[in-house]
Structure formats: structure tokens, C-alpha cells
Image (cartoon, grey):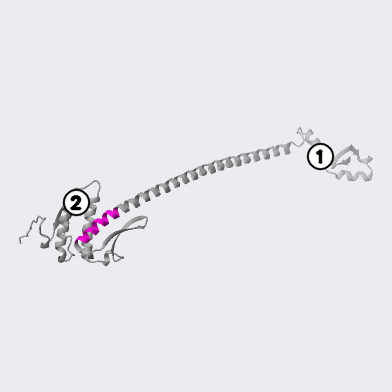
Amino acid sequence: MSGCLCRVENDETYPLIESIPGWARPGGLSAFTAWPLSRYDRGRDAMDAGQQPGSQGSISGARTLTSLRRRLDKLLAQRSEAVSSVKRERLALLEARENLKSSLKAQEVLQGVAQQVQQFAHVRISRVVTRCLESVFGDEAYEFRLAFDRKRGKTEARAVFVRDGNELSWRDVGGGVVDLTSFSLRLASLILTRPKLRGLLCLDEPFRMLSVNHSAAVREMLVGLAKEMKIQMVVVTHNQLLRGPGTNVIDLEMNA
């Protein structure tokens, strides 16, 4: 058997004697036979095998470095895409804010125009209806108004009758008042429509709920409105009291 006599310095092992014959070794040197190979010995064995010292570790480290670089490139690409996405979202947000501002301004303009139209319609329609009510009922007539309410995103008009400061709905007034108001609204619609329509208004028993005591006042109202507003009214009725000056009457009879 042979052994190796080595020197240890800075955690490195260096051989001092390549081989000691078994017969020349003192008994105290037998412990050297159990020493592991040092880095020097492993490097020398690798050189003897035709490899560079540490070549396997270098290859493994290079593979690890390549893998890390690929992962880093992937993360950088994801970051770049995220930054671009954030920029696009910011631009879209700015555009949405500008559109919202424009929409709010347009809404304000439309609301202003709508209020002007409502006021104009209220004045003209209320004037026509109130005049017709006063022509028939005199001092006991109601004042007619239009109230505009915002419901379900739409503007709705509501008829209001006022007397002595009290507001009443159409349910709280008599049927004759409702009939006369209905006629007045049709007349106002014909007058205010643009482009202007042909001045013809056809009515079928428009005052059936109105007391016959007011028939003479109704006839005078119809004749006066027709002349003033230059419209023609065709009224189908069984009320003979509507006959009179300023009216042309056509009698129709059904034969059994």
C-alpha cells in the first residue's frame, strides 16, 4: 500500500510527497491514507481526463444565467405592455371626461331651451283655455294653468285649475269644465302647430257634459273664435240651442 503526505494551508490541501511506500511509512502516517482528495487533486484529475477545472460548474452557471435573462426579458416585456395599457387607459379617461363635460353643457343648453318652450307653451295655451272658460262661465270661471313635472326622465304636463288661490285637478271640477277645457286644448294645438295647418276643426258632441244653460254662451264663443282666428269649425251635435246667428246648420235625418 502507498499513501500521500499533504500540507493544509488556508483550507487548501497540497501534496508534499506523491507516494510513500508502505514499508517506509511510520505507523503515524497511516492516517493520511483516509484523507479525501483536495481541490488540487480533483482539478488535476479533471486535467488528466481532458477537462478544464470547474467546467461542469461553469456550464451549469451559464444555463442558470441564460434562464434568468429570459425571465427578466419576459418581465420587462410585461412591464412595457402594462405601462402602455395604463397610458391608453389614461387617454381614454381624459377623453371620457371631456365628453362628459360636453354632454353636461349640451344638457344645460337643452334644459334652458326646454324651459323657454315650456314657458311659451304655458302662456299661449293657458291664455286660450282661460279665455274660453271665462267666455262661458264668466266670473265663476277657473283660471287654467299648465304644471310641468319631471318623471322617469321625461317632462310631463299637468292641467291645473285655480280659483280663489286654490289649485284643483281635473277630477275636482265638473264635467262641463273638462269638456270645455278639452275643446280649448284642441283649438290651442291647432293654432300653435308649425308649420301652420289648415284652419279646420271637426268636433263630435264636444260639450255633452255642459249644462244647456250655457249653450248660448258656447255658441257666441264658437262664432267669435272662428272669426278672430280665421278657422272653420264643424260641430256634430244634438243640441238645437247651438243654432243661431253666425252658424250654418245642416240637418241630417235617418229614415227607418
Residue lying furthest front: 139
Q: Can see residue 4?
A: no
Q: Residues within 10 Å of mark 1 (few under 14, many from 20)?
A: some
- Residue 144 is situated, as x and y percent measured from the top left of the image, at 27, 60
Residue bearing mark 2: 229
Image x and y of residue 207, in percent: 17, 62
Which residues make up the magenta segment?
Answer: 121-135
- 221, 208: nearer the viewer: 221
Residue that appears at 38% across and 48% down: 109
Vertical position of residue 217 compared to residue 58: above or below: below
Helix, strand or loop for disc 1: helix
The residue located at (35%, 55%) in the rendering is 154
Disc 2 marks a residue whose amino acid type is Met
Left-right relation of 169 to 247: right
Tell me: 110 left or right of 242. right
Q: Nearer the viewer, residue 151 or 136?
A: 136
* Residue 178 visible at all: yes
Please tell me in which quadrant of the rendered image residue 256 appears.
Answer: bottom left
Residue 83 belongs to magenta span: no
Query: Which mark's residue is nearer the viewer, 1 or 2?
Result: 2
Quadrant of the snapshot with the N terminus = top right
Residue drawn at x 24%, y 58% is: 129
- Hey, what amino acid is under mark 1? Arg
* Rendered image: mark on residue 39: 1
- Find residue 32 and report its horizontal and vertical position in percent: 88, 43
